[in-house]
Amino acid sequence: MSAKLTVVRSGALTTVQDAGRHGYAHLGVPRSGSLDAPAMTLANRLLGNDPGAAVLEATLTGCALRPDRGVTVVVGGAPCPVTVDGRPVAWGAPVRVPADAVLNVGTATAGVRSYVAVAGGIATEPVLGSRSTDLLSGLGPAPLRDGDVLPLGAPARQPALPFAAPWPAPPAALVLPLRPGPRADWFTPAALRTLTSATYRVSPHSNRIGLRTEGPALERRSTGELPSEGMVLGAVQVPPDGRPVVFLHDHPTTGGYPVIGVVVEAALARAAQACAGTPVRFTPG
């Protein structure tokens, strides 16, 4: 019988995430998956898990968990205090949690999203090949609630990384390389210059669907209606208020606002850890 984790404290938003659902956009299903894939991958490798094994993604206030048997965990991503039954333990390195002890992942001291990897991975039932929670479509397990019980997989037999690898610091400022989008011609030349010269800030209304920004509005030169069209990860859509929104992993697969550009995917992991108020600059990429 497999080990289980009981959720003692679910926190502001804790979800199950893995490498995501690929290849279903034509069915209206976005990728979902871990917003900070490098953090998930490193946490898993420190345990000898498959790099894309399912983990818990905790937002801002962390979570608390109780295993029914001894397990080894890594808490990484956004730095935070970590305790086992109230005793401080290492962040960013493997920690043994005895049966019925409480692992408490505290509030992030920097960044936004902490990742809890467990040897063997979270073993909820896959949906379309992924265990990820998709907040927009509702696919995958629901966001965690107090009292939920999560099954764990069998610990992997491949070797773990032999050391606590360096973790990237959350960004003090976010630089997002931008390629021209399919509707850049819907905006005035001044708006295009503003996009790559002004400093925006991360809005507190950002979430897994999109990183919203605060800053100068971008003026359209075409004000007509745009039929709904396909969206990709990293698309920068401009709604009627003129403030760019960067689509993240739970983004819709279609949208009716013009896409002025597309952020290079490799830059999006840092966007996952950018707190509200973080300066944002878009640069030609």
Image: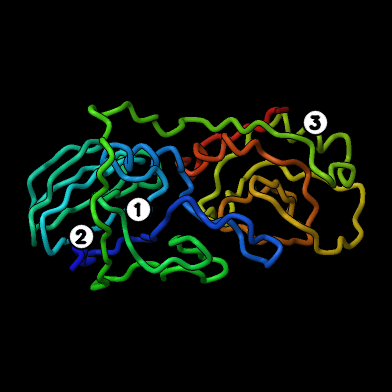
Q: Which colour scheme is used?
A: rainbow
Report whether 88 appears left or right of 229. Answer: left
Mark 3: give few (<14), some (14-19) or many (20+) Cα within 10 Å: few
Q: Residue 5: horizontal and vertical position, in percent?
A: 21, 63
Q: Which amino acid does label 3 sit on?
A: Arg
Q: Are marks 1 and 3 in contact (CB under 8 Å)?
A: no
Label 3 element class = helix
Q: How far apart are marks 1 and 2 (CA)?
A: 13 Å
Give the numbered dot on residue 193.
3
Q: What residue type is labelled 2?
A: Leu
Q: What residue type is labelled 1?
A: Val
Give the numbered dot on residue 55.
1
Looking at the rendered image, the quarter that the C terminus falls into is: top right
Give the numbered dot on residue 65.
2
Q: Are marks 1 and 2 in contact (CB under 8 Å)?
A: no
Q: Mark 1 or 3, which is nearer the eye?
A: 1
Q: Is 145 or 218 nearer to us in this picture?
A: 145
Q: Distance between the residues labelled 3 and 2?
A: 48 Å
Residue at figure coordinates x 19%, y 53% from the top left: 104
Residue at figure coordinates x 31%, y 58% from the top left: 122
Q: Residue 200: horizontal and vertical position, in percent?
A: 62, 38
Q: Earlier in the sequence, mark 3 or mark 2?
A: 2
In which image quadrant can residue 94 be found?
Answer: top left
Mark 2: give few (<14), some (14-19) or many (20+) Cα within 10 Å: many
Q: Residue 51: horizontal and vertical position, in percent?
A: 39, 43
Q: Residue 267: horizontal and vertical position, in percent?
A: 57, 35
Residue found farthest to the front = 157
Vertical comparison of 218 with 11: above or below: above
Mark 1: give few (<14), some (14-19) or many (20+) Cα within 10 Å: many
